[in-house]
Amino acid sequence: MTGPEMAALMSRELRTLERELNAYQTEEQVWLVPAGLPNSGGTLALHAAGNLQHFIGAVLGGSSYVRDRDAEFQRRGVPRAELIEGLRRADEVVRETLTRLDPAKFAEPFPHAVANRRLKTGDFIGHLAAHLAYHAGQMDFHRRIVTGDASGVGAVSPTELSSARPIEP
């Protein structure tokens, strides 16, 4: 995948997280942690935004973002509007950075070691997209449990991918 295609894929997942947050019936539900689940929907939103702001925005894009990973998992009661704003900022950074990233960078080592390993930048960007989708699925499950509403929010729609075109008759 190219940088713009990866950006579009991540953007779709970030929009899914926003739709999930909007589907909670109350602000309080966003922060509930039912037995058997490790994180609230709010925690997942903070973590997804922080992860992308750091690895794509700061490391690849040179932004001034400073990550506080511990806070992503410790903060509570952040208003839904603030969570959504964080996801939108992450989306902007992802789209801006990946669409202008030199395609040759994808074959180069990622600038920082990850889990004491060296990875190609393209591999790590693919991992970040999968990581984001994983957390979107977790938030969907969390929302369904705490709200009792089994309806979906239109997640993982292939029609939102950058190459999606209507079939012409």
Image (tube, rainbow, N blue to C red):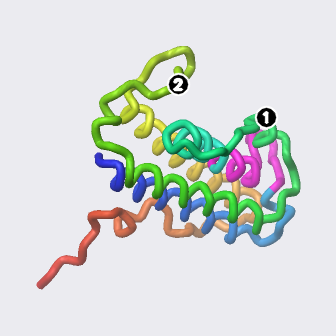
> In the displayed structure, would residue 19 be above or below residue 133?
below
Front residue of this view, candidates 161 and 144: 161
Q: Name which residue lies at 38% across and 52% down.
A: 100
Q: Residue furthest bottom?
A: 169
Asked which quadrant contains residue 120, the reply is: top left
Does residue 83 appear to the left or right of 160 in the view shown? right
Q: Name which residue lies at 68% across and 53% down.
A: 45
Q: Which residue is mark 1?
A: 70
What amino acid is at disc 2?
His
Number of residues whose C-alpha sits closer than 10 Å to that of mark 2, classed few (under 14), some (14–19) or many (20 or more): some
User: Which labelled disc corresponds to residue 112?
Assistant: 2
The residues bearing labels 2 and 1 have C-alpha atoms spaced at a distance of 19 Å
Residue 22 rendering spot, x and y as whole percentages? 68, 70
Q: Residue furthest top?
A: 116
Magenta residues, start to end: 31-48
Q: Name which residue lies at 29% across and 42% down.
A: 103
